[in-house]
Image: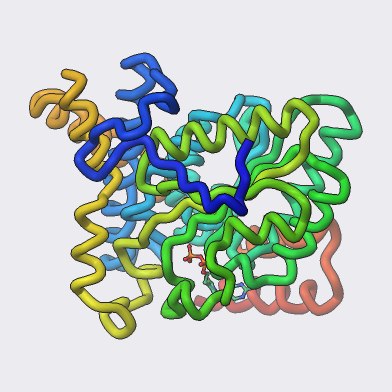
Amino acid sequence: MFNPLEGKYLQILDVNGNVVNSSLDPKLPSTTLKKMYEVMMLTKLADEKALALQRSGRMGTFAQSRGQEAQVGAGFAMEKKDWLIPSFRETGVQLVREWPLENFYLVFMGCEEGSKAPKGVNNFPVAVPVGSQMLHAVGLAWASKLKKEKVCAVTFFGDGGSSEGDFHEAMNFAGVFATPTVFICQNNQYAISLPRAQQTAAKTIAQKAVAYGFPGMQVDGNDPLATYVATKDALNHARSGNGPTLLEFLTYRLGPHTSSDDPTIYRLDKEVKEWEKKCPIVRFRKYLTKKNLWNKKYEAHLINKCKKQIEVAVKIAEKKIKEIKVEDMFNYTYASLTPELQEQLEYAKKAEGSS
Ligand SMILES: Cc1ncc(C[n+]2csc(CCOP(=O)(O)OP(=O)(O)O)c2C)c(N)n1
C-alpha cells in the first residue's frame, strides 16, 4: 500500500500518452478505455453547453470541470453499490455512475428535482457548502461497516475544502473507526482566487493522512489510468477492512471557478498555457491513438452523439423547469417548515401570484 512519507506520486501516462509505469498499467479492455474517453468528452461538451446556456440567461451560476476530466477514472474504479459523495465539480464521475445528464442542468437551473438520484444509483447530489459532504461519506461508510455490507463511500472535495473543519472531523472519525471511505482531493491549484500555496503550509495535501493514521498519496489527476488505479487500490484496501485512504489528484482548473468568475485577475496566462499542454483529454487521445483505438471518424461520430444526448437532456430540463412551483424551493428543506420558512413561503406565493 501507499506510504505518503515516501513522497510517492502515481503516474501511468505521461503528457504524450506514453505508458511510463507499465507495471501499474491496469490493462483495461479496449471497450472500457473508449468508454472512459467518451465520458470525458461528454463532460467537456456538457460543460460547454452549460456555459452557453448560462451566458444566454437560460441557466444560473455553475462550476465547470474543464481540465479535470480525468476524474472519470475514479468512477470506473468504483462498484455500482459504492456511494459517490461529490462536491460540485464532479460531473464526469457522476456521469460514469449513471447520473442523468438532465439532472446536471436542472440543478444549475435552480430545480431541486435534479438532486434526486434514480433508483439504484448510489450518488449523492452536488454539495455546495464546501467540505460538508465529507462527513456524510464517513457516516455512510461507517453504517456500511456496521452492517458488514462491503460498500465503500468515495467523496470528492477541493484543495480549499481541506481547510474546512469538516475535513479534519471527517478524516479523524474515518481513521478512528477505520471506515471504508476514500477521500479524493481534486487539487486544482486554486480555491476561487486563493492559490494552493496559501491554502496550507503542508508540502502536500496527501500527507495530511499521516496525522489521522491512514495512507495518503499524490496522483497525477490528469491521467485517467492513474486516477483509476489509485482509486481501485484504495477501494480494495477499504473493502478488505483496512479503513480509509486520502488521494490527492494533482490537476488544474482550466476554466473559471464558476461562470461568475474572471480568473485573469488572479492567475497568469502563462500558467494556464502550461497546464493546457497537460490536458487529460488530449493526453488520453494520444494514448488511444497509439493503441489504434482513436481516429478522426470516431471523434466526429462521438462529438455528434454527445451533442445529441446533450440536446435531449437540455430539452427535458427546460420542460421540467417550467413545471416547478414556488413551494418546491421549500419542499426540500425540512420535513415540516419552521415558522420563519412558513412565513417566507406565504410571501413567495403571494409575490408569484401578483407577478
Ligand atoms: C462553507 C462554505 N464556505 C464558502 C463557500 C464559498 N465557496 C464556494 S466554492 C469555494 C472555493 C472552493 O475551493 P476548492 O475547495 O478548492 O474547490 P474548487 O472550487 O477549486 O473545485 C468557496 C470558498 C461555500 N460554498 N461554502
Expressed as whole percent of the image width and height from the top left, the position of residue 122 reads 65, 34
**Can you say which quadrant of the picture contains the N terminus?**
top right
Residue drawn at x 34%, y 24% is 33
Is any part of residue 353 visible from this angle? no
Q: Residue furthest front?
A: 6
Residue drawn at x 50%, y 80% is 198
Expressed as whole percent of the image width and height from the top left, the position of residue 224 reads 38, 37
Closest to the observer, 262 or 345: 262
269 relative to 116, above or below = below
217 relative to 343, above or below = above
Closest to the observer, 41 or 209: 209
Residue drawn at x 34%, y 69% is 256
Q: Residue furthest bottom?
A: 265
Mark count: 0
Dividing the picture into quarters, in which one does residue 304 lie?
Answer: top left
Q: In the drawing, does residue 41 fall left or right of residue 26?
A: left
Expressed as whole percent of the image width and height from the top left, the position of residue 182 reads 65, 43
Residue drawn at x 16%, y 26% is 289
Which image quadrant shows ligand 1? bottom right
Expressed as whole percent of the image width and height from the top left, the position of residue 79 reads 61, 25
